[in-house]
Image (cartoon, rainbow, N blue to C red):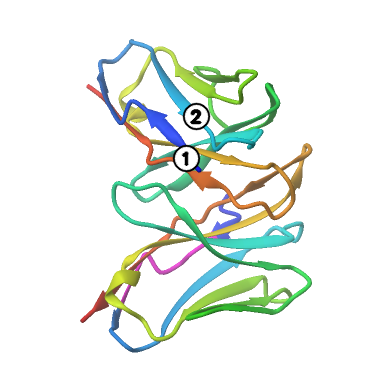
Amino acid sequence: DQQVKQNSPSLSVQEGRISILNCDYTNSMFDYFLWYKKYPAEGPTFLISISSIKDKNEDGRFTVFLNKSAKHLSLHIVPSQPGDSAVYFCAPQHASGGSYIPTFGRGTSLIVHP
Amino acid sequence: KAGVTQTPRYLIKTRGQQVTLSCSPISGHRSVSWYQQTPGQGLQFLFEYFSETQRNKGNFPGRFSGRQFSNSRSEMNVSTLELGDSALYLCASSLGGQGDIQYFGAGTRLSVL
């Protein structure tokens, strides 16, 4: 039973264009939503996050949108650069047993072509 | 500030053996979490330790265990290895609070033959 779904395993975009990565979740208890980026042979690194009380958070070329009623969030990268080519994980979290462990989606592999 | 260090980076074992993986968190981080990553499955949560206590546990069999030491360093152990245990094992450290960012090590690639 997947609580977090990233339905696009891969996405191919031309350099300079917008990349939109989507994430759907089922658990209404999630209150923080994080995105991580992973390059091959490296561990994931934090990219951007959003609290459930907001619907948008922007950091440079990266913007995350949250639609709580639809239980959907998306990550926009504008403009996309070849160095953005990586696997992106959506990772919402909520308090559970005193800890705040993110639940990771299966990831979307983004390829940005020069 | 040093990042999260995992050792070893690569391991090859045979079925039935046991293995111990090590993780040194970022200084000051009291929470250490372990994940298993297999192709197409994303990151599956194994367990989290906070101040030497297991605070949360994922849906893995009892063959997977862990511990945390007083200096926050953590180890995970897998006994009676199976072929399906072949995966990338990732360790992450954080302060352990709401909305905290997890900082990941590069992982240990375990191959079970």
Mark 1 crowd level (few <14, some 14–19, many ≥20, 10 Å Cα): few
Local SS, label 1? loop
The percent coordinates of residue A89 (x first, y second) are: 48, 59
Identity of the residue furthest to the bottom in this view: A17
Return the residue at label 2: B24
Local SS, label 2? strand
Q: Number of callouts in the render?
A: 2
The percent coordinates of residue B59 (x first, y second) are: 58, 33
Q: What's the magenta region?
A: A5-12
Q: Is residue B58 in view from this perspective?
A: no
The percent coordinates of residue B20 (x first, y second) are: 42, 17
Quarter of the picture containing the C terminus of chain B is: top left
Q: In this view, does B11 lie to the left or right of A79?
A: left
Return the residue at label 1: B2
Q: Name the residue: 49% across, 17% down.
A: B63
Q: Mark 1 lies on which chain?
A: B
